[in-house]
Amino acid sequence: MIIRQLKETQFEHLHNALIMKAHAEPLDASYTVNMTINGAEYAVKVQPEQHNKMAVLQALRIFREEYGPNFELITNGTVLSALLEILIYQGGH
């Protein structure tokens, strides 16, 4: 899990983007964002926190194969941080 402190405007833009575009289960504090980066598909679990902080809990890399999808759980902090940076950048635009 990675937690990042954001500027208030960054947090608001990203949080609004999550509300509009991400998937959330009932009574769940986190959102699942589907992303495709260079042809690789990811499902990223993101959770807004207090004081303009955003947490990336985990991510799945999804491999679409002939007999169905396979998944790779990503918990590496560097990769999670990079995915969060992309979400912040996209949320602000």
Image: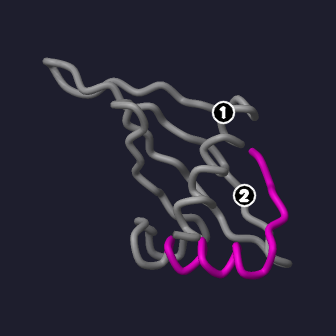
Please tell me whether mark 2 sits on a helix, a strand or a loop: strand
Q: Amino acid at mark 1?
A: Val
Where does residue 52 sit, x and y in percent of width and height? 80, 75
Q: Which residues are magenta?
A: 1-18
- Seen from the viewer's position, the closer of residues 26 and 71 is 71
Dominant SS in magenta: helix
> What mark, if any, has residue 55 been given in the picture?
2
Q: Residue at x 38, y 42 (%)?
A: 36
Residues at badges 2 and 1 in contact (C-beta under 8 Å)? no
Mark closest to the chain's N terminus, 2 or 1: 2
Q: Quadrant of the N terminus?
A: top right
State the residue lying farthest toward the left. 66
Occupied quadrant, residue 61: top left
Q: Nearer the viewer, residue 48 or 93?
A: 93
Three-letter code for the amino acid on which mark 2 is drawn? Ala
Residue farthest toward the front in the current orientation of the protein: 93
**Residue 42: mark in rendering:** none
Check the image and report above or below for 93 versus 40: below
Q: From the image, tell me which residue sits under label 1.
A: 79
* Colouring chosen for the image of the structure: one colour
Q: Is 80 left or right of 8, judged from the image as shown?
A: left
Q: How many labels were placed on the picture?
A: 2
Q: Between marks 2 and 1, how big is the CA–CA gap?
A: 13 Å
Q: Left or right: 57 with respect to 18?
A: right
Residue 71 placement: quadrant: top left
**10 Å crowding of disc 2: few (<14), some (14-19), many (20+):** some
- Where is residue 88? Give x, y as percent: 63, 61
Q: Secondary structure at mark 1?
A: helix
Compared with residue 7, is residue 56 higher up or lower down, i.e. above or below? above
